[in-house]
Image (cartoon, grey):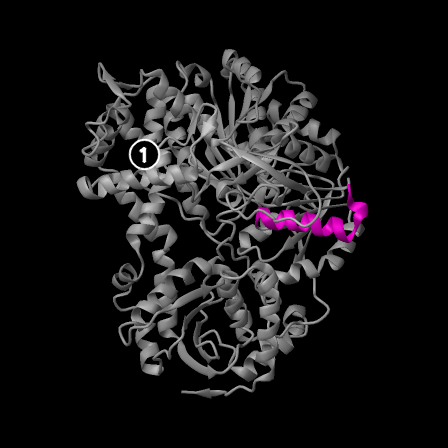
Amino acid sequence: MADFQNSEGYKIIHNWLAEKTFSPFEFQLKTWEKYSRGYSGMVIAPTGFGKTYSVFIAVIADFLNNPTQYKDGLKLLWITPLRALAKDIAKAMAEAIAEIGLDWTVGVRNGDTPVSEKAKQLRKMPDILLVTPETVHLLLGQKNHQRFFKNLKCVAIDEWHELLGSKRGVLVELSLSRLLSYQKKLKIWGITATIGNLDEALEVLIPYDLKKTKVVAKEKKKIEIQSVFPDEVEILPWAGHLGGKLVDKVTPIILESKTTIVFTNTRSQAEMWYQLLLSHHPDFAGQIAIHHSSIDKDLRIWIEENLSSGYLKAVVSTSSLDLGVDFKPVDTVIQIGSSKGVARFLQRAGRSGHSPFETSKIYFVPTHSLELIEVAALKEAVKQNVIEPRVPMVMTFDVLVQYLVTLAIGEGFDPIETFPQIKKTFAFSLITEAEWTSILQFITIGGGAFKNYEEFHKVIIEDGIYKVTNRRIAMHHRMNIGVIVSDAMLKVKFISGGYIGMVEEYFITKLNKDDKFILAGRVLDVVHIKEMTVFVRGGKGKARVPSYVGGRLPMSSHLGRFLRMKLSDALQAKTSEKELTFLHPLLANQEERSVIPKEDEFLVELIHTREGYHLFFYPFEGRLVHEVMAALMAFRLSKYEQLSFSMAMNDYGFELFSATQIPIDDGILADILSKDNLLRDIESSINATEMARRKFRDIAVISGMVIQSYPGKQKSNRSLQSSAALIFNVLEEYDSENLLFKQAYSEVFNQQIDEARLWEAFSRIEKSKLILKFANAFTPLSFPIKVDSLRQSMSNEDLGDRIRRLQEASMKKKFKKNNK
């Protein structure tokens, strides 16, 4: 360390920081020193402590110490998961470079970059280029692309925790393997917030024989978590309605703060809250904005700039502002509803008080009373410093196929050289030579099932080099590079001209001419739909808020564990836990009518109403896990008696409903909750083939078997699904060993069903004391699940009336508190 601090480069950096009255944190200094000694590695530090400068300044200092080792052209490639991050970071880097006195240039290259700027970059690369994972692959698909990277010194991967565990992370792994083949001395540095599996995260990023290190900041971010309480607790709560009722408590928080980000979990919720705030406080007009991924790019950029400048009082946002964009004026964050995970909550909290010595302030606004228990659980998780791991993806052959075709449209690739590169990545370390051969056959002749179909013969072999020579194939591939497959989006334009944003196809097909919907905070009238564009005019009055597929986030297992812990000792809660004290009437009511399960107990309630029999289970494992568990319980119960069930679930539990009596006692309950033959019964209880068929749609798009985007148009969701289903059926009948076909089933069991988490849940339940309670009306825990089942079949107008009737009936009834 002393040698580095005596270097000329460090002295220049030290003087620059001193002029700004800054001094480096220990983790920054350690990163600079490790980089100077030839290390690659990963920096782990809280939001707002200068993780960016730890790696960026390391490269600058190394250049100042060794200028002759750096040549013209690209020196630092900076990969970020979000476009907004790139622009913000590039601006900060350019300012620092100018203040230090270097003549380095900084460029940004992504989907928002003008074509003229991209062309300029191809002629002469900037010294630092900020890109997304998809953009790196587009560069690798350029002819003679090695010239871009011949003087590259370092690749930095920002927000690695966001990329790890996704196919975008696999894109990064594959691009790094290629860049290392061009530059053997290339340094790789990841930048991440704290996650639960840091050692694995480092190994996934740098599985190579490089000098590597992990630099962990000692500093901790101070976080202040405050709950927003309703005026009174609702004994029988239901999801969704309470958030809107609390707008009168949210408005003063915004008014008293300098600048606020209001985070929601879905785009539809963001649109709703934007309207609520404007209606409640009309003076917000012109002072607040809405930000999500379906809004026009230029509007998003305007919002980001005015949030940075402090012009905007508040922005209602989805995860589009989750990551490390430094909006210095933001001193308050409001979270609407559960964040569903500890890491996501901390990430969002960190958007306020962004400088190291400020406290991040976050307010939690529940959408129903029970969510206040999640605040208590979040506080406990933060106190114990427990954060979820990110599980890396492996053997994603669809991404590999896309990558190989990308190389083939560029300079081509030699399979003998490329196979060892790919096998060195974490994602494909287990790939066999037989699987490699199968992939090569697939991209050249379509594999076994499609050898007679020319559209699958994309790559040809010339002198042992695999190339794409067909310009049409190359153009279509470049247009579709990436691994984010969304449902078909339709553009929304004013009939008079002007682009507003995007809505999903499945929502807009439910609307007729003159129907109203809300987008980007505006009420719009549908004029007509032509091809993939919705033409609208400005409207007034009541309007529908677009719903988006995949809007519901799954609750993490870690948050579920703390939730069970807090619920377990809820009635013995200390007075300092305001949330549990406030909820005491609800929790006492649950204990009176049924029971509040302890940590080592598992509660099941059978409730008999005029409609029929409702069997409620409470694993607290999240909606996605409960969906599978519900199907499994129905399957196992059907062995005792053939019954027809309908199902409903939320993050706390699930319901099986039957019009006829459900056979259940302690013995049957122990049997159906056993982990014996668990995987076999899961396969029998769900339609795995249908789930795999739907999963295959994404795999088919990513691998290029189905083309999603063509010049000037996009395939409709229905067309996409039917094309993928047709291919799936062909593979099922004629080539069931196809790696992409098998991958669909693998993803179903590893991701959608979450096999590992299910096994852990049943192992826990098997060790718990099973409690079966009988009642004749709904309990505080069961009621929100019941409401979710009603929401699936009733309009919002009818739903409110029905819920009130159910609440009144349930509160009147006396409960049997017996245990059979």
- Identify the image quadrant of residue 16: top right
Depth check, front residue: 7 or 143: 143
Identity, as a three-letter code, of the amino acid under mark 1: Lys
Position above or below: 716 against 791? above
Depth check, front residue: 508 or 764: 508
The C terminus lies in quadrant: bottom left
Depth check, front residue: 250 or 205: 250
Image coordinates of residue 247 in percent, x first then y, are: 72, 57
Farthest residue, direction top: 123
- Tell me the residue at 36%/18% (across/down): 472
Position above or below: 121 against 511? above
Image coordinates of residue 149 in percent, x first then y, are: 44, 19
- Tell me the residue at 21%/29% (across/down): 441
Position above or below: 274 against 425? below
Classified by dominant secondary structure, the portion drawn in magenta counts as: helix
In this picture, residue 545 sits left or right of residue 770: right
Stretch of the chain drawn in magenta: 266-285
Image coordinates of residue 629 in percent, x first then y, are: 37, 64
Image coordinates of residue 400 in percent, x first then y, are: 33, 33
Q: Circle 1 is placed at which residue position?
A: 424
